[in-house]
Amino acid sequence: MTTTPTASAELRELLLAHIRDVPDYPEPGVMFKDITPLLADAAAFGALVEALARLCTQHGATKVVGLEARGFILAAPAAARAGLGFVPVRKAGKLPGDTHGQAYQLEYGTAEIEVHTDAFDPEDRVLVIDDVLATGGTAEASLELIRRSGARLAGLAVLMELTFLGGRERLLPALGDAPLDALVTI
């Protein structure tokens, strides 16, 4: 699994300059990392999309998955820039038609995500893109969905990894030899 820095120092600085800390959101004691200022800045957002599109190409992806909901905002334009198809992975009950579902554990309870059963072909190499890697539960569930769908995993790319929450360690078995790229680590 790749553990080397993915973004240049210049790109990391640009991205971090546009990520706002919001204290005590969504609950007291949490420091929320708000990416809306980054999305609102054309140069910063464009640099982010370009970096993610390069990862799509570098890892030989044939499809790009975005995780609901902020992952959609990053994955769709990166897929388009790389000339690839985009596949949404959504919360259970949000996709029409036949789906594969995968439940995963939350701090208090469980959740489930789904993907269309016909989203991937067996020869597809899928890169998963999301905004944040925290504890890794949603990402781990998405990797299982991709494998159950018959496709191969090209890797996982995130804008930001919150290293103190241990998501990378949780994902090691699920990733196998596929890379995990974080443009910014906190």
Image (tube, helix red, strand yellow):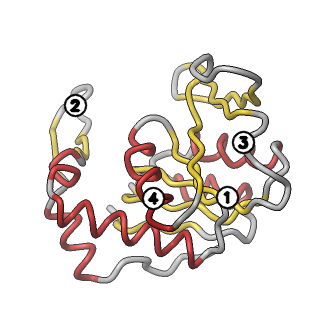
Q: Residue at x 75, y 48 (%)?
A: 120
| Residue highlighted by disc 4 | 158
SS at circle 2: loop
Using the numbered discs, state the Cα–Cα distance from disc 4 to disc 3 in whole angstroms.
21 Å
| Residue highlighted by disc 2 | 25
| Residue highlighted by disc 3 | 119
**Of label 4 and label 2, which has the lower sequence position?**
2
* Pointers 1 and 4 in contact (C-beta within 8 Å): no
Using the numbered discs, state the Cα–Cα distance from disc 1 to disc 4 in whole angstroms.
14 Å
Amino acid type indicated by mark 3? Ala
Viewer-proximal residue among 76 and 176: 76
Amino acid type indicated by mark 2? Tyr
Residue 126 is tagged as 1
SS at circle 4: strand
Residue 14 is tagged as none
* Pointers 4 and 2 in contact (C-beta within 8 Å): no
